[in-house]
Image: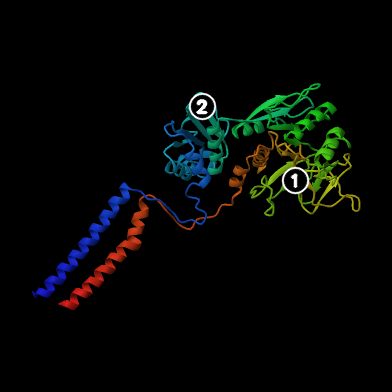
Amino acid sequence: MSRSVVRTGGLAAAQAGAVIVAIAALAILSARHAWHFDLTGDRHNVLRPETQEVLAAIPAGAEPIEIVIVTSRALTPEGDARSAELLFRPLVEKLVRGSQRVRATIVVAEQQPDLVKRLAMTGVPTAVLHWNAPAQGERPAESRERRTDDVTEAGVTAALREILAGKRHVAYALFGHGEMQRSDEGPDGFAAAAHLLENANFELKDLALVGSAEIPEDAEILIVAAPEQDLLHSDLEAIGRWVRRGGRTLLLLGPGREAGEHPELRRFLKEAWDVDAADGVVADFDNPLGGKQVMLLIPPDPSARHAIVAQRREILQLPICRRVAPAGTFPVGVSVEPLLSTGPRSWVETNVDVVPPRFDEGVDAIGPHPIAVAATRTHEGSPEARLVVVGCRHAFDNQFIGIGGNAALLRNAADWLAGRDEDLAARAEPAHDGTLVIERRQGLIVLATMTLVPAVVAVAGVATWWMRRRL
């Protein structure tokens, strides 16, 4: 055997050995030092900057924030625990990778019933956050807990921000005029809506405006949930004073059984807020009509820009609604924007004795008709006051809040009233499918097989060619 053949064979063996050693070294490195790559268009496999900012705000040396995401097999078509976990595993992995100051786990309700009972769970999915907050300044150490049924990165980020602040938003529910009660678990009650708001970090309290009573100083939101009787003049005067100092109100006001109901409340809305709550029931040829249950199905509106309804993805199912629209009185400092509107084949049936509603050509105004509005009012030297009026008594009652996007509408309205504009903006960001995700060990393995190995082979080929030229 010639010397040249031996040298060529030895060189080839050395090159093959070098490639094998390189691949083995890369495999060992990838196992010990995981690198994560996200090549998706919207970077949805890494934490958003606002989430990273919130995590960075956890005090150094403090105990980690424990996050337990409770899911259920019923949430998946497969109906098994693994599929239920997979729904939220990407979120948990992002949080754990993003900070050592959080510990996140997933619990399948059917597998740990004792834990679900101890947590007093009333619905899934829910994220439960717990933190033993250290003493800070004059604030003593305390145990804090927050919950959210918005189990997305935006929802968990909002809950993290709230648990770090150690403060809950205070909302008062007015009663004394036949309003829906937050303790009522019947079909027409407000208990499910109250639970949703409590999970969104609102502390709900009852409020009766008797005589010269004022709305409490700690009130951030006033909820007037479908009063059956008109509000008293003294009630509206107290609400007016609260509005002038930046008060924020959520009002549900469905159509009355008789024309002209709630004259004082409607006058206040028109004069103080430029909002007209018209008589009559809004019906639509394209929606179900039957008996007294006149249903409106409101599909998502891609052109909607207000934070409460931007990027709405689910159909709303709203029974027995009235037209709620800008009145055109144009008070100084007031701005009104429609939130929800019916279709072009809708009309307002002003004759309350006609059941079901009947369209009269030339008499009834054809749609579209707004059925919910958001308004702002500014006063010099005072915070901005806000108002949301939904012209449907039953939009958020126990019977309908779990249908379609009704719950999301309530949550968004409450968040906007509370000034959580940043959380709303994050929640409204459209989701895009990623093109490629490379994470954990796959990162270096794919890198090795796609780039380094071909490069080593190419270099080996060039070296072989060069050596053969010299033989």
Q: Nearer the viewer, residue 259 or 455?
A: 455
Is residue 345 placed above or below 127 in the rendered structure? below
Say the numbered circle drawn on residue 296. 1
Counting from the top left corner in percent of width and height, residue 217 is at: 69, 27
Image x and y of residue 173, in percent: 71, 28
**Residue lying furthest top in this view?**
211
Q: Amino acid at mark 1?
A: Leu
Q: Closest to the observer: 227 or 95? A: 95
Dot 1: few (<14), some (14–19), or many (≥20) neighbours within 10 Å? many
Q: Answer yes or no: is residue 124 visible.
A: no
x and y percentages locating residue 457 in the rendered image: 27, 67
**Circle 2 SS class:** loop
The count of marks equals 2
Q: Name the residue rendered at 60%, 30% in the picture.
A: 168
The nearer-to-camera label among 2 and 1 is 2
Q: Is residue 22 left or right of residue 433?
A: left
Quarter-of-image position of residue 194: top right
Give SS at disc 1. strand
The Cα–Cα distance between marks 2 and 1, rounded to whole angstroms, is 53 Å
Q: Looking at the picture, does residue 16 appear above or below residue 198?
A: below
Q: Which residue is mark 2?
A: 137
Residue 273 got which mark?
Answer: none
Q: Is residue 181 above or below residue 153?
A: above
Q: Position of residue 351 (x, y in %)?
A: 89, 42
User: Which quadrant would the N terminus be assigned to in this image?
Assistant: bottom left
Q: Is residue 333 left or right of residue 22?
A: right
